[in-house]
Image (cartoon, rainbow, N blue to C red):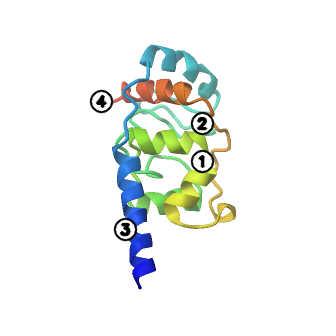
Amino acid sequence: MKKTLLFLITAIVFHIVQGLSTNAEGDSERGERAFGQCKACHSVVAGESKRTGPNLFGVLGRKAGSADFNYSDIMIAAGEAGLIWSSGNLDAFLSDPRKFLAEYMDVGASQARTKKTIKVGQGSRREDLIAYLGTLKQ
C-alpha cells in the first residue's frame, strides 16, 4: 500500500513539474526560422486545413489530441487524461514523443505509438520552437 501511494504521489509531482516548466529562454525569431523544417507536416495558420501533422496554431494551452486531426489512440487518451500542452510538456514530447507518452500514460513504449516520429534533440532548438509557437494565439 505504501509503495503504491508513493508511486502515485511521485507520478502526480512529475506531471505537475512537467506542466509548470517553462521555456522562457527560447528565442521566438530563431524558433520561427527553425520551424521552416516543420512546415512540411504542420501549419501554424489559424483555420488552415490540416496536413500530415496537426495545425499548431494556439497549441500552447490546448488539450492534447483535441485539434482537427486524426490523432493516435494514445494521444487522444492522453488528452482525455488531462494532458495540456504547456511549455514543459511540449519540450518533453518534442524530445522523445514515445517516451513522453509512455511515461505520461504509464504504459510501455510499445503502447505509446504516436504519429509524431521525429525527435527534436537539441534543447535550445526546442526552446526556440516553443517560444515561437507561444506567439501564435488569438
Q: Secondary structure at mark 3?
A: helix
Measured as percent of width and height from the top left, residue 122 is found at: 60, 29
Residue at mark 4: 138
Q: How would you rate the neighbour count of disc 4 (Cα within 10 Å): few for under 14, some for 14-19, many for 20 or more?
A: few
**Secondary element at image label 4:** loop
How far apart are the two marked residues, 4 and 1, measured between alpha carbons?
Answer: 27 Å
Q: Earlier in the sequence, mark 4 or mark 1?
A: 1
* Depicted 26 relative to depicted 98: above or below: above
> Which residue type carries mark 4?
Gln
| Marking on residue 105 | none
Kindly state the secondary structure of the residue where label 1 is placed. Answer: helix
Q: Earlier in the sequence, mark 3 or mark 2?
A: 3
Please provide percent x and percent y for residue 134: 38, 29
Name the image quarter holding residue 60: top left
The residue type indicated by label 3 comes to Ile
Residue underneath mark 1: 97
